[in-house]
Structure formats: C-alpha cells, structure tokens
Amino acid sequence: MRKIVLRGRKVVGGRAEGEALVTRDRISGWGGIDPQTGTIIETRHELRGQSFKGKVLVFPGAKGSSGWSAQFHNARLAGTAPAAMLFNEMTTKIALGAVVAHAPAVTEFDQDPLQVIATGDWVSVDADNGIVEVTKRER
Amino acid sequence: MKLADDEKAMLDGREGPARQKAMELLLRYGEALGAERFVDTRNVCGTLGATMPFLRDYAAKHGAGIDAVFSEFSLCSAQALEIPKVKVYSCHLQQGLDPERALEQGLGPEAVKLYREGERFFGRLGVNLLNTCAPYLVGNVPVKGEHCAWMESSAVIYINSVLGARTNAEGRESAGAAMLTGKIPYWGYHVCENRRGTHSIELEVEVQDTADWGLLGYWIGEEVQESVPVLNGVRHVPNLARLKHFGAAASSSGGVEMYHIAGVTPEAGTLEEAFGGKTPRAALKYGAAERRLAYERVNTTARDRAVDYVMLGCPHYSIEQIWEACRLLEGRRIHANCSLWIFTPRAIKQLADQNGYTKIIEDAGGVLMTDTCSSVGRVVPKGAKVAAVDSAKQAHYLPAIMGLQAWFGTAAECIQAAITGRWSGGLR
C-alpha cells in the first residue's frame, strides 16, 4: 500500500485517524451543514447529503455565515464532528471552528492535500507535529 | 502570542474564572490563526442565549440555565460559570424568534419563556439587545479604522467595506469572549495590508436596483470566494439598502468580508488606492452572461409558480425599505393562499408603528416581525412550500435549511406574488 506524508502547521493540536472525505468546494457552517447528522446540506454543494461524522475532512476552506464555528461546536456536542480537519485557506471562521470542534487541524502544507488525498484514503493526523500520513486506498 | 499585562492578568484568573476562560479561548483561537498579538476592541456584536432552535433543545434537555448556555456556547466551557458584566460596548444580533409573534411562528410558551429569561440575563450583563442582523441600522455605526469584533457575515462585510471599520467575521465563541475581555486577535482585516483589493471586477452592465446589487454580489462571492473584490464602472452610487443586499449575497455564495467600490467606499478614493499599489490577482468582467448565470444559480430550487410565502427583510429591512413596501401594498390585499412576513429590527418597527406602516402592512394581510428571520429561527408559515424573496442570501439558505423552494426577484415582484399567489417575475 502506497503511503504519502504531508507536513504542515498545527492549527489545533491532537491526534486522530480516519477515512478521508475530500471536497474542492468550500464549506458553509450555518446553513451549510446539519449538525445533528454531520451532513452537508448546501443546495449546490458537491457533497450534499454526505456526512463528515468521524471522517478526516479535507477541503479548501470555509465560506458563508459567521455561524460557522457555532455549527461545528453543535456538531461536537451532537457527536457528529469530523475526526480532523485539513485545509488550505485560513480564515477566522475555520480557525475558531476547529478550536471549538476540538478537531485536530492542520494547514499550510508542503503539498496540496486536495491533490494528494482522495475520498476513501486512510489518513492519520498528528496535528501537534503537523504530520499527516496518507495510506492510499487500493483501487 | 505576545501578551500584554492586562491580558496576562485575565489569563491568570485575576478577574475571575469567566474572563479567564474567555482569555484561554481567545488564546487558542489566536494561535490557531497564527496571530502574534491581540488588539483592544470596544465594539462587539454577537449572538448569545438559547433562542436558536438547537440551543433551545439543548437547554431543555440539560435543564441548563442561561449561565450554563453562555459557558458552553460562548466560552467553550462545559462547566457552568458565573458570567460577569461585559467589559466593553456589546450588542446582541438576531434571535431565534419574535416573542410577540411566537404563535404564528409555530412556537410554544417554553420558547418565549427562554427568550424572556435571556433578555433579563443579558440585560443585566449590559448587552444591548438590538436583536438584529443589521446593528448599523439602529445606532451601532462604527467609524473608519475602529477595531470591532462582530459576528454576522452581512454586517461584517458592510462595516468593513462601506464604513471602513475593522473586523473579521467573528463567531459566537470569539464574540462572547471579546465581550468579557475587550480583546480580539490582531489578524486579517484588522491589518492594513490585508484590506487591499485582490480582484478587479469591471461592470459591463448597469447595476441599479437592489435586486441587481443582490445578483452582482451572488455572482462575485462564488467567483472570488474569500478574496477582496474591487468594483469598477459603477455608474449609479448605491444606497444603504443596495449595499446591504450586495454584501449579504457575496458573503453567502462565497466568503467575502471586504470589498471596495472605486470612487465610493472609504478606502477606495481611486482604483490605485483600492489595490494599494499592487497588481490584481485576477481581472473579471460582469456582463449580461454573468448576470444571467447569477440569476439561474440563485433560482436553482424554484420550480412551482404557486407561491404560498413571501419573505422580505433579509438582512432586516430599513425604514426606507418598509416605506417602499408600503407604497406597493397600500390599498391592496394579499392572496388568501399566501402569507407575507416582513422582518425588521424592533427599534425600526416602533418607527413603522408610528408612521402607520405597520397598519398598512396588516390591512393588506401581511405581518411586520422583529428579532429573527425564516432561516435563522427556522420559522415559516405553517405548510409553506414555495417562497418568494428579494434577498439572494435568503434564496441561498432558506431551501437548504427549511426545504422550501425559493424564487428570487425584486421587492415589487415579491409583493406582486403575495397579491396574486403566483410568481410572474423574471430577469429583465
């Protein structure tokens, strides 16, 4: 099995692993997810109807309402938060969202995680050291 | 992060456990951002309390008091703390319901009781209960250069771009913590360099009425995402309502928190000033094809022409917009199968009462509501399936949150739909 290692900067510390869920669309929090189920609900989003619960969510960044952090906070309390967050574009929404979701999070990678990681890959995140290990799914 | 003495004191708990928790949260947040220090703020807007749907259920299920709700949802503390008075000028944004209209909104006495408890609690703390997504309509009008800590994407983009104030899109937790500490990370749009334009947008079509501005914002947000667009070629200087709708749209389809209009907004006396001497990363054109694309995108969910709900007031209507709606409604009667709800801040409803506008709306069969909106409060008329809205933001969110279809058009098209019960709007 092919393994790839990415290095980046810690946003929120901690370790987690799980299956990757990758999107090239930015994610809205409020009005973009249902925290009760961890499902994307935005009308024209490519992941509409899919859940990020327990997944390593790989996405470009956050957009939309300032209720972003509150929705991911609610997701944590409902037990539907992602296991970890990997992203490219830093914003206040995503930084605060990762903090209150207690989700290990990494950004500023040496390689673009959207190119390297595919949905279904197994991803192990050591956010304290900014190390992300990707095991490619057999295809 | 480098901390000042007063910040260290709060972090050490010298001002009590709640301010300590607030400082700890702000520190984690600042480190996540990569900020180097905090900036003092004396103007904070946020949502607190338990009037939103998820929060109402949480408070009921856990038997939690408002202090416990504030501790968890504003300070990220599972332990309930005693919440002290706010340290700086703090205002409450929209709530989850209109307590005077709870019955029509399908909510029982429990929700109203929780609302009233929150009202007393936050009043005692010194939070000013503006209860609107548009605090700049009712007296909180920051000055150019003023460091603020505001939530509400449509208000953030308005005060950054139109007023020249400085804020990032804060969240519920960072706004709550800023109210108790007067601190927010010095990052993003607090810093001069980050406020410069990144994308140039050349207008090739006339952008005049509020719906035009909504379409333009909806298109731009999707094209530039979280960047800083600069509009060139604006021939008609827009007013408050138009920029309110434009910004709300651009921060819904994308994540725009700051824009410039050359010759209009305060940090863009000229195109050169807007870009701060830098070359734009991209140059885009907004012509008839882009306008049509925006119209199609914002009307994605609309199929059935029988309209049973018309919602105006996203962001909350100004008194000017209520006056305009009344000119279209006066002496008319809305269709028996259709409801018309118009949302505005409570202070503006008082003006509308005084001017006789509330009566005009009610005589036509509509309702003037306050504090909330259909997407935030998840409140729509019973059985509503097809909505008409004059807000691209609401057309974006309402179908995703409530499962309704939404037609987007001008306020006049929406009011026509309320009167006939049918959508007859279209792109002109």
Image: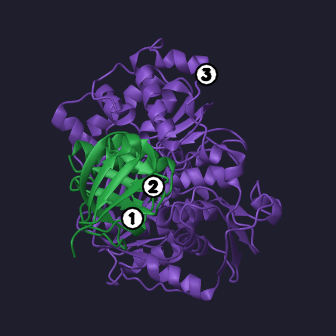
CA gap between label 3 and label 1 equals: 41 Å
The chain painted green is A
Pointer 2: what residue? Answer: A65
**Numbered disc in front, either 2 or 1:** 2
Left or right, B203 with reference to A73: right
Q: Nearer the viewer, residue B167 or A2?
A: A2
> In the rendered image, which quarter is residue B277 located in?
bottom right
Which residue appears at 22% of the width and 39% of the height? B58
Query: Judging from the image, what secondary structure is the residue with disc 2 in?
Result: loop
| Residue sitting farthest toward the top | B14
Q: Determine if residue A34 is in view.
A: no
- Up-down: is B190 above or below A113? above
Q: Nearer the viewer, residue B228 or B137?
A: B228
- Up-down: is B110 above or below A112? above
Chain B drawn colour = purple
Q: In which quadrant will I find the C terminus of chain B?
A: bottom right
Q: Crowdedness of circle 2 by 10 Å Cα count: few (<14), some, many (20+)? A: many
Disc 1 is attached to a residue of which chain?
B
Left or right, A4 with reference to B200: left
In the rendered structure, find residue B4 and report the number of the disc placed on it.
3
Sequence-wise, the earlier of marks 3 and 1 is 3
Pointer 1: what residue? Answer: B397
Q: Determine if residue A103 is in view.
A: yes
CA gap between label 2 and label 1 equals: 10 Å
Coloration of the structure image: by chain
> In the rendered image, which quarter is residue B123 located in?
top left
Amino acid carrying label 1: it is Tyr
Q: Crowdedness of circle 3 by 10 Å Cα count: few (<14), some, many (20+)? A: few
Q: In which quadrant will I find the N terminus of chain B?
A: top right
